[in-house]
Structures are given as structure tokens and as C-alpha cells.
Amino acid sequence: MNILVTGAAGFLGSHLCDRLLAEGHRVFGMDNFVTGDPQNLSHLSGNGKFTFFEHDVSNYINVNEKLDAVLHFASPASPNPASPYGYPNLRIQTMKAGALGTHNCLGVCRAHGARFLLASTSEIYGDPLEHPQRETYWGHVDPIGPRSMYDEAKRFAEALTMSYFYTHKLDTRIVRIFNTFGPRMRVDDGRVAPNFVQQALHSEPLTIFGDGSQTRSFCYVDDLIEGIYRLLLSDEHLPVNLGNGTETSILEFAETINRLTGNRSGLVYQPESRLGNDPERRRPDLTRANSLLGWEPKVDLETGLLRTIDYFRKKMGLA
């Protein structure tokens, strides 16, 4: 297939490009580098099956060659206001990527008769009152809160995607991505995995907001990409959760990283999250992913963290 990937220079987008190319597809990558890193695609220079366009998806998209699929992964994704790449510092860009970007991608798909896959998020569930979260759960979301620009952009993107499915019979997919980590995350991304790893590699105490009892489910990037590829090839139009079903507290996550890096500086506690409305618990119900896609995560937390730590050590010049 000829496939367009938006957000191609991002953490997930670049891994997705690699997987699609490995499967023999021709890939058109698109990014404006607001949060994407050109180095994530540097290994693809000279690859005859990869073409890159520097472009903002919130503007009209034109690809002259016939496309068979568009995978929309362009969006800031970090909730950390201390990071220049966090969506609290990119409020309008985040909303435009989710609204105008999704609209433009759907328009391209309609013009080409192409399949569309939207990268949505577990954040659409907000601070969930249901646990674990099933795809049928509507969520508990503050539409004007400190996370609203990301949550509502993705919720709108899902609604627009389903509107194109029902109105124009467009062949659509929606993946709801839970916490994912791995190589090619920015060191200063601001999300919990890169925060902890870079602090540990600098022999600093790891900063925990609250008491560390809040939970997440951490999925290694290779597992996630496998699930996304299976979803792309499936016939499922309704949202599908992808993530790891093993729930891990932030405290346990921090202690594991300190142990794997040999960091003896311990932990430091801050009274609250840097960003309000931080969900207390987050874990996907993976029943649909397993039954529809035959998918479940394979890489255990420690193996994924060791690979990620090795990447960060090299990225930070500490190898």
C-alpha cells in the first residue's frame, strides 16, 4: 500500500513508519517538527520507499500520488507544562491538530478512497470512574480544565471520524492508546518515563507528585505498533483500546527505574501534580483488542525499560 503517516517524526509515528516499511509498504511521512524530532527519521534517508513532507496538518494536505491509507498521529502528547513540548504550552496547535488536522486527513482519504486510522488516546476517558476502562465507557472529562485542549481535541477527532464513517461510508479505524514508552521519546518530553529515566541517569532523586499511589499501565512501543498494524488491516470501525493490562503504581515504576539504572539517589515527593486533574487510575480493558485482533502485549516492563534506558543513555551521551 501507499500510506501517509502524519506526525511521522514523533515517538510513535517514526516507529510506525519503520514497521510499515518493513512490511513492504511505501510510506509518505509528514511532520512540522513542533514536537517531532528529525533524528527519529534520519535512518530513513536514502530509503527509496520513504518520502517526507514538512507540513502542518492543520493546513490543506495534498499528496499527488494515490494513497491507500492515512494514519493520523500528528499531535503534541505530553501533559507536562514544564516541557516546551507539552500540550499546555501548545494549546492551539493541539486543538488544531485534533480538529483541522483530522478533518484534512479525512478529506484526503475521501478524495483517494483510502482507509483512515486515527490515533486517539486513553485521555478521552478523563479521570475515569470505571476501572478498567472499556471502549463503551463515555468518560469523566472536564471540557475546560488544564488537560482539556488534548482531551477534547481527541474526543472531537473521534466524533468527526465516526461522522465520516456514517455519512460518507469512509473506511475508518480508531485506536485509543494508553501509556506507551520506549526509544525515541524526547529526553525533555515531560512524560513520566523519560522524566524518571533522565533523572536516574543523572543520579538525581526521581520526582513523584503526590504519594505515588496513582497507577498507569505501561506498554512498550513495539507491542503498541504491532496492535496498530493489526487494527489497520482489520475490518473494525469502532474504537479499540491498546496498552498494557498490568497496572503499575508510579511509586513502583520509579523504584524499578532506580534499580535498573543503579541510581541510589532515591525519590523526592512533591505535594501535587504539575497539571491538575491527573487521573488516579488508568488501565485498559483489552478484551476487544484480544478478540478482534488476536493481540496482547508481549514485552514485560523491565525488558522494555532496559531498552529505553539504553537508548536514553546513548542519547544523553552517557554510553
Image (spheres, rainbow, N blue to C red):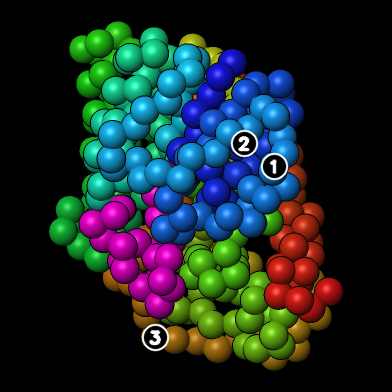
Where does label 3 land, which residue?
271
Q: Counting other residues with Cα less than 10 Å from the Cα at mark 2, is it few (<14), some (14-19), or many (20 or more)?
A: many
- Comparing 9 with 213, the one in front is 9
Q: Is residue 114 visible?
A: yes
From the viewer's perspective, is the residue at label 3 or at label 1 nearer? 1
Task: Indicate whether 48 appears above or below 165.
Answer: below
Provide residue 301's location: percent of width, then percent of height: 71, 55
Does the CB distance between marks 2 and 3 fall below 8 Å? no
Where does label 1 land, which residue?
44
Q: Residue sitting at 64 percent across and 56 percent down?
A: 39
On screen, residue 125 versus residue 215, left or right, reads left
Q: Amino acid at mark 3?
A: Pro
Q: Which mark is residue 17?
A: 2
Q: Residue sitting at 32 percent across and 15 percent down?
A: 110
Secondary structure under the numbered disc 2 in the rendered image: helix
Provide residue 11's location: percent of width, then percent of height: 57, 51
**Magenta stretch: residue 88 in it?**
yes
Task: Determine the CA span between mark 2 and mark 3.
Answer: 40 Å
Does the CB distance between marks 1 and 2 fall below 8 Å? yes
- Disc on the earlier residue, 3 or 1: 1
Q: In terms of image quadrants, where is residue 111?
A: top left
Q: In terms of image quadrants, where is residue 167?
A: top left
Q: Most prominent secondary structure in the magenta stretch?
A: loop
Task: Determine the CA span between mark 1 and mark 2.
Answer: 9 Å
The span picked out in magenta is 74-94
Task: Indicate whether 132 appears above or below 106.
Answer: below
Q: Residue sitting at 53 percent across and 24 percent down?
A: 3
Q: Amino acid at mark 1?
A: Leu
Provide residue 176's location: percent of width, then percent of height: 44, 38
